[in-house]
Amino acid sequence: MSVPALRLGVNIDHVATVRNARGGALPDPVRAAVLAIEAGADGITAHLREDRRHIRDDDMARLRAEILKPLNFEMAATEQMLDIALRIKPHAACLVPEKRTERTTEGGLDVIGGRSHLVPFADQLKRAGIRVSLFIEPSLEAVEAARSIGAPVVELHTGAWCHALAEGERARAGMEFQRIRAAAALARELGLECHAGHGLDFATAREIAALPGVVELNIGHFLIGEAIFTGLGPAVRMMRQAMDEGRSSIP
Ligand code: PXP
């Protein structure tokens, strides 16, 4: 099988986090999105959270109107978010679990216990022509359950693996990486499009890029942090390079 291309989705949520710290209009996440695209991003991801802690409704509307690459709308499976997604009609929607008290999306969706809740959301988004993905734990059971929900795309949560690496827990990191590898392979076998994201940096993106089943990475926090030191354009270009290096290591 030939190796598919690997897309980079840049998540610009944390440009809005910095803006909101002062309550004004700057820095503008839409300007960041335009810059990221100019530097080689294949798409832009933004998460409109229930508490609007970073991205706000008007950011989503402006992103949809002003960027020339696909917009991936991360959203909780709630009626309010569904209404907004159906109105804005992004290229893609990624359903994610959301808790008010968490700092970031801490785990994957409960695609097994939450199946009956998720099916109507996936159906309505698909009927509107929006590509639906489910943000899931990297497990075989979750991939199977995601398929039974009818989503054409899964995004594997790489956070546990990145966290284990950052903590120096090599054995656990090795195990987590094997879970990601197996889940990506199963997704590919089942005909699901497989994405990955959460906590990725240059080194971890390079490793994930070497998995042929994965066709898109969504990366935010690290890139926005790097942008403080190098500028967003160079940070995106370096990420693109790391991903290309990982991809080209596939025999
Ligand atoms: N993918 C999903 C579904 C996410 O919820 C997030 C975090 O918002 C990311 C990717 C990006 O994670 P990070 O900001 O850690 O790169």
Image (spheres, helix red, strand yellow):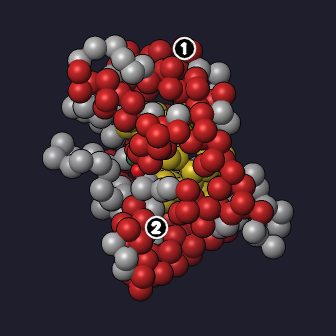
Residue at the location (69% across, 51% down)?
A: 241
Circles 1 and 2, Cβ within 8 Å, touching? The answer is: no
Q: Is residue 229 above or below residue 63?
A: below
- Tell me residue 168's x, y (percent): 37, 77
Q: Which residue is mark 1?
A: 65
Question: Relative to the observer, which residue lies in front, 123 or 37?
Answer: 37
Locate the C terminus and report the quarter of the image it occupies.
bottom right
Quarter occupied by residue 26 = top left
Give the residue furthest to the right.
Answer: 2
Residue type, label 2:
Pro
Residue at the location (60% across, 34% down)?
A: 233
Quarter occupied by residue 60 = top left
**Mark 2 burial class by Cα count in 10 Å: few <14, some 14-19, many 20+:** many
Residue at the location (51% across, 20% down)?
A: 31
Q: Which residue is mark 2?
A: 138
Disc 2 residue: CB within 8 Å of ligand 1: no
Q: SS class of the residue under badge 2?
A: loop
